[in-house]
Image: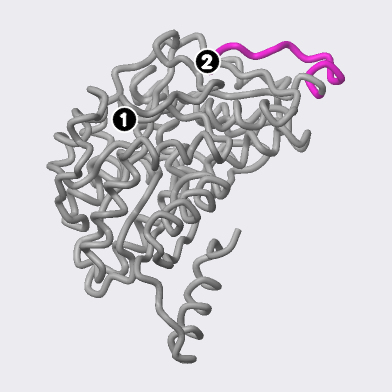
Amino acid sequence: MRGISAFGAGAALWLCAATAGMTAPSLTVLCGVDEAWCAVMQKAYEAKTGLEIAMTRRSTGDILNQIRAEKAAPTVDVWWGGTGDTHLQAGSENLLEPYQPAHERDMLPWAQNFFAMSGGRSAGIYAGALGFAYNADLLRAAKLPAPTCWKDLTDIAYRGRIQSGNPNSSGTAFTTLATLVQLFGEEEAFRYLAALNRNIERYTSSGSAPVKAAARGEVLIGISFMHDAVTQKEAGSPLVIVAPCEGTGYEIGAVSIVKGARHVEEAKRFVDFALSPEGQATGAAAGQNQVPSNAMAGLPLAAPDISLIKMVDYDFATFGSPEERSRLLERFDAVVSATN
């Protein structure tokens, strides 16, 4: 996957290119979706424009932290992908540039609402429901009951058999945290998280890592967005995907232009491409199964039908605010520390 690397390696390569007199990238993008989609999107945009771009994959929380740290002198032009509440937080901190994209009129209603909520600073590019998946082969071998609800995951039978993302770095995991608060109320949600923590084998920095580990048979259960689990199942893994019985939350993945971007006109063209049917088709081409935001874009055949899933009325405005996010993360860290 040319051009995709850990941030430190990407920065070093860029510096070497500059000092050697090579052509610098015309656009720098931080990518918050799966690595495969990052690669396909980069190739498609470069083929369409004839330009070379630098694309680096990072977890959503890490992207927000980098953009904050570089506020005075941004090195990034576009933030593409990752959970929308984190984009909203960046917008509320004046870290993003307002832009009216060319395809905004073609967006589905949930994406138009998200764009309005962001004050025109972030546009929704896909939606996906939260859930979990278990490895059917491991479940059968261990003779364990199949979980169907969030609260099933606290059963002692799953001690050390579950992976989840860390909400400090993973947008998926922060969506999980916010979903549980909205489903159960904050006090019950944190009692639940303390009980669940006893069964967690590992907290991952990436939100899709838990279901990938379950697909490989390294862990029984992975908490993640359902479309990430579908991608693994389509590749042949023995995953059973669960929409929790109590209900669940969802994400709106977004794209934003970083305030102070050095290549702002090219950044606008990238956003327009990301919202076009052609740009959104790169998700299915990369084996991804999110629901695209453009009404003219084709729906991936294996995409979960989110209209059939019991969903919370996810409060993006509240959980996208810096104060609420920081407060919940601090409380989460205290719970995990206290129960370890």
First-in-chain label (1 vs 2):
2
Q: What residue is rendered at 64% in x and 42% in y?
A: 202
Amino acid carrying label 2: it is Ala
Residue neighbourhood size for the residue with mark 2, other residues' Cα within 10 Å, grouped as few (<14), some (14–19), many (≥20): many
Asked where in the image residue 68 lies, by quadrant, the reply is: bottom left
Q: CA distance from mark 1 to mark 2?
A: 25 Å
Residue neighbourhood size for the residue with mark 1, other residues' Cα within 10 Å, grouped as few (<14), some (14–19), many (≥20): many
Where is residue 154? Give x, y as percent.
Answer: 60, 21
* Disc 2 secondary structure class: loop
Q: Which residues are magenta?
A: 138-150
Where is residue 115? Give x, y as percent.
Answer: 19, 36
The residue pinned by badge 2 equals 243
Q: Quadrant of the C terminus?
A: top right
Q: What residue is rendered at 26% in x and 68% in y?
A: 263
Q: Tell me: residue 217, above or below residue 187.
A: below
Q: Tell me: residue 159, above or below residue 312.
A: below
Q: Which of the two residues, 315 or 272, is positioned nearer the viewer here?
A: 272
Where is residue 329? Give x, y as percent.
Answer: 38, 44
Q: Which of the two residues, 337 or 7, is positioned nearer the viewer here?
A: 7
The residue pinned by badge 1 equals 294
* Disc 1 secondary structure class: loop
Q: Which of the two residues, 294 or 33, is positioned nearer the viewer here?
A: 294
Residue at the far bottom in the pictured view: 20
Q: Of the numbered discs in the image, which one, if any, rests on residue 323?
A: none
Q: What residue is rendered at 66% in x and 38% in y?
A: 212
